[in-house]
Image: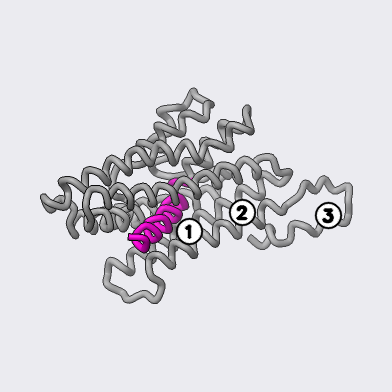
Amino acid sequence: MIAALLAAFLLGLRHGADPDHLAAIDNITRRVASDRPLAGKFVGGLFAVGHTVMVLAIAALIGTVGRRLGAFGSGLERAGTWLSIAILIAMAALNLRRLLWSPQSAPAGIRTALVLPLFRESKSALIALPVGFLFGLGFETSSQIAAYVMIAAGSFIDALCVGAAFCAGMICTDTCDSVLVTKLLGNGNTARASRAWLWTMTLAAAGVAAYQTLQMYGVALALPQLALSGAIVAALVAVYALLLRERVDDGSDPQRRHQNIGLNRL
């Protein structure tokens, strides 16, 4: 059980770093932090709490009836994985188009484009709660599917424990996301840093889609799912760390003109 909880926590960390999650949190944080920077730091946590409600509800459903009725089988798992691949490819294409032909630097996502217009007029951090709740619907991410497979293999109590560990990992990642995005927005190199972050998300979406596609076609991969999860989270943290080291360079100090080399390479 301890191993299962640890695996679920790592999958939750990975789920919180899904490109579509990051796009939604990024967009809401930008909207909120423009007026209330302190409130912007709580967007990711609120999003994850709303998402947690739906995930635990689905976990409870699978733990009670899904496994017994055979409702959660290989067919649903494959359908969810293909849907995940389609969403990631579409997201990578949208963001690549934005990077090449648009001055916008806020990340785009399919579900983000569908859900956020419902809360167009609000600049409150609380809108992250219902947005996160709506994002919890479905089986469209590989990390979420893997967690549900683990849930279906246990009892009702086991299902809730695994679901809670998964959500704890997701809350950690999503909270850090909004905190760091808020810091980036307060950075003097906002536009350039945002586009570097957008490149990172685009490459992550394309990479995960390629990985899942190879898995679906039965290609043996040396990197297992949990290792991929750790690699993605580590890469995102590394990029964030690089971006947050950037300082305001107004051109008045010649010694500060070479501080942005790492970001330029991105």
Looking at the image, is mark 2 or mark 1 nearer the viewer?
2
Residue 69 as seen in the image, left or right of residue 16: left
- Counting from the top left corner in percent of width and height, residue 257 is at 82, 55
Residue 180 as seen in the image, left or right of residue 50: right
Regarding residue 82, the answer to whether it shows in the image is no
Residue 20 covered by magenta stretch: yes
User: Which element is circle 1 on?
Assistant: helix
- Amino acid type, callout 3: Arg
Q: Residue at x 33, y 54 (%)?
A: 84
Q: Residue at x 45, y 54 (%)?
A: 13
Q: What residue sits right under mark 1 in the picture?
A: 204
Q: What residue sits right under mark 2 in the picture?
A: 240
Q: What residue sits right under mark 3 in the picture?
A: 256
- Amino acid type, callout 1: Ala
| Frontmost residue, 87 versus 150 | 150
- Counting from the top left corner in percent of width and height, residue 105 is at 58, 44
- Counting from the top left corner in percent of width and height, residue 118 is at 40, 28
For the residues labelled 3 and 1, the Cα–Cα distance comes to 31 Å
| Frontmost residue, 86 versus 43 | 43
Q: Which residues are magenta?
A: 1-22
For the residues labelled 2 and 1, the Cα–Cα distance comes to 14 Å
